[in-house]
Image: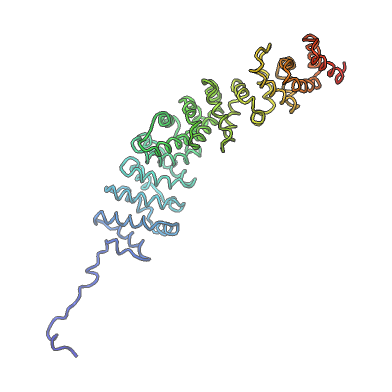
Amino acid sequence: MQSYKLHDRHPYVEPDFKDRYDPSEVYHAVFDRSIPKLIEILLMENIEAFKYRDALITLNEMVDHQEMKDQMISQGLVGIASAYLHHKDIQIRKQAVILLGCLVSIMRGREQLGDLSFDGLSKLLFDDAREQCGWALCRIITGRDGVDILCKSNLTKKMIQSFMQSKEYPKFTVYLLEAFAKIVEFDNGIFFFLNCGTIQRFIEILSQENYYDQSYTQRITYLSLEVLSKICANHEGKEEAIRENAINVANRYLDSPLQEEAYFATILIMNCTINLEGKKQCVHVENDEIIQKLISLLNKDFSKDVKQALMNIADYPDGFIIITKLLSNSYETLDDLLGPRVVIALAKLIPRGLENYDDYKQYGRTLCKFLRDYNEAIYIALEETVKIVEILMEFFYYTDLVRDVTDSLLKLIEADVDSREYALNYLETHNANSKEIQNISKKILELFPH
């Protein structure tokens, strides 16, 4: 049955759904088909630029866990994002490099990087998307394979070139330094930083640069110290840093209230003092400043590295003497750091013909304690020092050290006949009327008769 009113009339027909559907609209990307739909939009040609941008923004909002990253990688989004690194619109380039950074934080994504990716990243290092590019590069080097990728592609060289020109971009500089800190952990990464002015640039940053935002200054400072200290683990890097006076610059940060700065300054000095010239630069400074600062750090969490730095410096004769002098009132620390061989330095610190007893009694007390506690110290003293008995006798006439000197002397003459003869002759010719002298002479003869 049909209404008579519709007779001979054309019925109302709604336009076909397909005629009203715009396939380039991002809001159609919903549910399980969201990723394929957004990819479809990105692959379209000659549509408005903002639609590419919106598609990339939507993908960035979705890529919040590893499963989603894995799906996007499987559908080819690493290559698509890499292609958009070359787009003329800056906002599209920024969103593309952010998406790429998210995808390459896992190994599957890094494995799909190619020349298109590297060329795009190289260009972004020098344009207004540099901060986003720096962030993405930090994602690439989350694994060792990422470091190898950057080194093989020579992208590291481009990063260094950009770093040398990035004084006005502190946030970008922080990203680059974080990436550098990972790259220089490996020999194939350190290679790029040698003899190219990079070390001089680090010295320049540590010497004088400050930024309006203090948080950037602190981060750039300790990251520069970290990178430079790791470069110094390499032989050539160490030599270049020493030539550029890196030790003197690191000295400024040893007493920094920021622990990261003090730590990396210590590591830098520790690495540089393996080199002879590095040892000299630490020793030949006014008021033994570097050694004193290192000693003050022995109670920090990184005391193991501080000890190693001091031990390196102690391999240089003058450094050995200075460290012994400054630690002479701390027997346990001196023992832990240098051990029984410290008796050589203590003997050198005590002058013949002692006049000002108070200035030297600590050396004598510590020397006696090492001789009493270690047989090895006795043999070292006999082999490496001249007239160790005479040195001990310098303190024999001061009542507060007589007991220590007597005990040490008895151990010496027990180990060495010449020392016994020398001690007896010395006691006979010096203050023979002294009751203490007579008692010790008698005791020696009783214990060790001729």
Image quadrant where residue 193 sits: top left
Placement of the N terminus among the 4 image quadrants: bottom left
Question: Does residue 7 appear left or right of residue 323 in this picture?
Answer: left
Q: Nearer the viewer, residue 57 or 325?
A: 325
Residue 282 relative to residue 126: left or right: right
Q: Position of residue 71 (x, y in %)?
A: 42, 59
The residue at the far bottom in this view is 1
Residue 399 location (% of width, % of height): 73, 18
Asked if residue 36 is positioned above or below residue 414 in the image, the reply reads below
List x then y, in percent, for residue 342.
67, 24
Splitting the image into 4 quarters, where does residue 347 fall?
A: top right
Q: x, y (%) of residue 441?
A: 82, 15
Position of 314 with respect to 22 (left or right) is: right
Q: Quadrant of residue 180?
A: top left
Closer to the camera in the image, 335 or 379: 335
Q: Quadrant of the C terminus?
A: top right
Residue at 59% across, 32% down: 308
